Each structure stands twice: as C-alpha cells, then as structure tokens.
Amino acid sequence: MRFLGSELWIICILLAVILDHFTGDPKSLTHPVVLIGKLIKALTKFLETRGRFAGLVMWAIVILGVFLVCLLIEFITLLNPILFLLLNSWFLSTALAEKSLKDAAVEPVRFIETDLDAARKSVGMIVGRDTGTLSKEGILKAVVETQAENAVDGILAPLFYMFIGCFLSRWVACLNPFTLVYIYKAVNTMDSMVGYTDFPYTKFGYFPARLDDLFNYVPARLGALFLLFSGKLLGRYRKGAYAIFKRFRRSSPSPNSGHPEAAVAGMLGLELCGSQYYFGNYHEKPVVGIAYKTIEEKDVLKTVQIVFLAELLFVLLFTVLLLLV
C-alpha cells in the first residue's frame, strides 16, 4: 500500500465525507459497526461474569479481529487502484455520521409542537436517558446535547484517526485511515455497549470505558475548539462563550463529553445536561453552561450548522497539513 501514497488516501477521505453527507448510513447493506456490535455481544455473553480483566480480554480480541479483517479487505483492494478508491471511500463513509446525526436531530423537532409523545419516542432513539416524561424543553436539550457529544464520537474523532492513518501509512502501511478508524469505531462501540459503571457491567465494562476515554482524549478537546471556531464564523458565538467553555468543560462525569457540550452551551447561551433518569434510576449530574435564554427549536438547527461547518474546517485543515508535510 505504500506506493499508493497518502494523496490517494486523502481522496478517499474527501469522497467519504461527501458520501456520508448525501447518503448517510447504508440502508440495503449491514453496517460494518453492526457486525462489530454482534462480535462484542457474543464475547460479552461469554465473558461478562468473569471480572474486570475479562473486559480487557474482550477488548483485545475485538480490536485484533477488526484489525485483521481490515487488513484482509485492504489486501483485496490492492488488486486495482479503482477498487481501492471505491471500497475504501465507502468503508470510510460508514465510519462517519454527519447525515445520521442531522436526521436524528430534525426528527424530534418535527413532532415537538404537534405530538409530544412522538417527539419523546424519537429522541429516545438517540439518547440513553428515560424520555417518557420529558418536557418540550427537555427534548430539545437532549437533542442539542447528543449533537454536541456525537459531533466528536461520530464525526471529528473518526476524521482525526483517518488523518492520523494518512500520516502513519507513509511508514507503516497497515496503520492507514481504514484500519485506524475502524479500530476507533470498535473502541467506541464497546464503550457504548458495555462501558458502564452500573450493573451488570460494573467490573466488566471498566476497561472498555477507560480505553474509550483515552482514544477520545485528544479529539474531544480539539473538536471543541473547532466547534467554537465554527460558531464564531456562523455568528452563533455569544459574548463570553469561551469563558463558559473553560468553566464547564470539566463538569461532566465523563472526561471528554463535557468539552463539546460546554462549547455548544457557551455559544448558544444554554444550560445543558444536569440530573436525569436512566433506566428508571435517578442520576445526579452537574449542569453544563448558563441559561441566558430558554432553549428553542432553532437552537437545534444552529447546532447542526455548527457541527457541519466544524467537520468541513477539520477536513480542510488536516488535508492542507498533510499535503504540506
């Protein structure tokens, strides 16, 4: 793969961003992340009662399995440069979620004035909290929060690992955008499935949760800065937004999710997060941001616009850097 150069990988990434924006997740094919999820589920069923280090064993098996499958696919794509371009562009696009996030944000807003129960059900598909009794304000907050957090998990962090792969593949062919981004997706999927501190994954989920924190450490902080800059360019940047970001970025129990949430809360003048019910249990959590205004439907659209521009700026900057280095 070394002879192909990072320029061809950059083209694959650009095509992937375009594909994701216009087509989103594949409808007629099984999503690669779904297959990863099935492997995680099977290993969890076998290992979950065996303690904390069983979670680490599961994590290692999944990462190794994903890495080997990616290498096999890469070997096949080397048969033809066109095949390389098409397959890698498609696989990279499935690791991004810009269109999916936008569609998921718009759906609850469509119902919020006419059918609050439908809006609650819709937002319940994208958040972990209990949504059955959420108010209109609670629904809108949930949408904005998940947009902010998943801007990193679903868009900026995958792009970060794609571009890191572009750079590393110049010397180590197997550490390319495809293998690195799917290792990240596996790490993120394991965290979402078993990375909890609550029963039944109190011990088993420890390493998947902590390792996801490690993989997202740089993307979360870098992504928050891109969100702030995007908000500034779009005129969504309230006076004092950066001060709000600095004050609340470490408020979340997660070491990473508070950064993008604080960035968006500061720009829009909103108070996000706070205590919620999860699976019927009340969890006390700190708020993020200061409520200078009541949240409105247009704040969801503003967040979608900020996230999309952040993605474009991220791609532009790293593409230029890779071409210059």
Image (cartoon, rainbow, N blue to C red):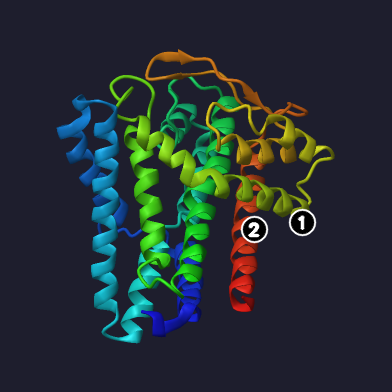
Q: Is there a contact, CB below 8 Å, between mark 1 and mark 2?
A: yes
The one of 228 and 181 positioned closer to us in this rendering: 181
Q: Is residue 64 left or right of residue 288?
A: left
| Vertical comparison of 318 with 6: above or below | above
Residue 266: image x %, image y %? 73, 36
On-image quarter of the C terminus: bottom right
The one of 250 and 242 positioned closer to us in this rendering: 250
| Vertical comparison of 185 with 250: above or below | below
Q: Look at the numbered disc 1 and give the secondary structure of its residue.
A: helix
The one of 216 and 80 positioned closer to us in this rendering: 216
Q: Which residue occupies 64% across, 73% down?
A: 320
Residue 189: image x %, image y %? 35, 44
The residue carrying pointer 1 sits among few (fewer than 14), some (14 to 19) or many (20 or more) residues within 10 Å by Cα, namely few
Q: Which residue is mark 1?
A: 233
| Badge 1 or badge 2: first in the primary sequence | 1
The residue carrying pointer 2 sits among few (fewer than 14), some (14 to 19) or many (20 or more) residues within 10 Å by Cα, namely some
Q: Look at the numbered disc 2 and give the secondary structure of its residue.
A: helix
Amino acid at pointer 1: Leu
Instruction: Give residue 251's quadrant in the image.
Output: top right
Q: Is residue 1 left or right of residue 233?
A: left
Residue 287: image x %, image y %? 63, 23
Q: Which residue occupies 20% across, 26% down?
A: 50
- Number of labels in the image equals 2
Q: Which mark is residue 309?
A: 2
Amino acid at pointer 2: Leu
| Vertical comparison of 90 with 84: above or below | above
Residue 113 visible, this orientation: no
